[in-house]
Image (cartoon, rainbow, N blue to C red):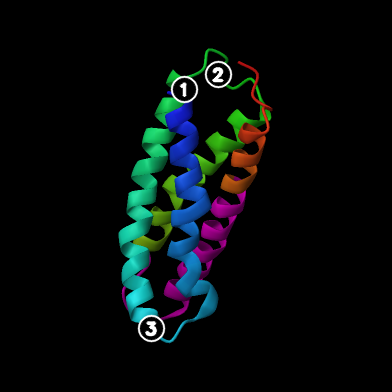
Amino acid sequence: AANVHAFLMAATFGLLIPIGIYPALTKMPTYAAGYDLHHILMPFNLVLGIVGIILGFVGTSSHMSSIHHWIGLLTFLAMLANPIIITRAPDSPGPERTKRANMHRALGYTVFFLGVIAMTTGGYGVVED
C-alpha cells in the first residue's frame, strides 16, 4: 500500500497537477482547451488524492507521527476545499466571481507546493514506520 501511495502522490503532484495548472500560469493562447484540460485533470487528481491518502493511512502503523503526515493531511484538506471555493462562485462576472477565482488560484498553487513538500518529506524517509 505504501508503494502505491507514493506512486499516486508522485503522479498527482509531480505530473498531473502541473499539467492542469499550466494553462492558468502561462495564459496560453489556447486557453479554452487548457481550461477543458483543467476540468478533466483536477477532479481526477482529487480522486487520486483520496485513494492515495487512504492507502497512506492503511500502509502505515504510525498515523500522524511525522511532518510528512501532517503536511499530507493539510494538502488533502486544501485539495478538498479548492473545488468548493470555485463552485460557490457566481456564474456571472463581477467582484465576487473575481474574488473566488483568485482564492481558487492561490489555493491551487498552495496545494501544488504543499504536495511537493509532502512528496519530498515522504521520499527522503522522514516518515518513521
Of the residues shown, which amino acid type is indicated by label 1?
Answer: Phe
Magenta segment range? 89-114
Residue 35 appears in the picture as rendered:
yes
Which residue is drawn at the image coordinates 37% and 42% (left, top)? 48
Answer with the quarter of the image where residue 5 lies: top left
Q: In what element is the residue under mark 1?
A: helix
Pair 1/3: label in front: 3
**Given the current orientation, which residue lies at the most extreme bottom position?**
29
Pointer 3 with pointer 2, Cβ within 8 A: no
CA distance separating discs 1 and 3: 40 Å
CA distance separating discs 2 and 1: 7 Å
Query: From the viewer's perspective, is residue 52 above or below residue 89?
Result: above
> Mark 2 or 1 closer to N-term?
1
Pair 3/2: label in front: 3
Which residue is drawn at the image coordinates 52% and 51% (left, top)? 14
Residue 57 numbered tag = 1
Of the residues shown, which amino acid type is indicated by label 3?
Answer: Thr
Q: In what element is the residue under mark 3?
A: loop
Q: Which residue is mark 2?
A: 63
Residue 30 numbered tag = 3
> Mark 1 or 3 closer to N-term?
3
Along the line of sight, which residue is nearer the eye, 87 or 56? 56
The quadrant of the picture occupied by the C terminus is: top right
Q: Residue 119 location in percent, x, y? A: 59, 40
Q: Is residue 91 left or right of residue 99?
A: left
Pointer 1 with pointer 3, Cβ within 8 A: no
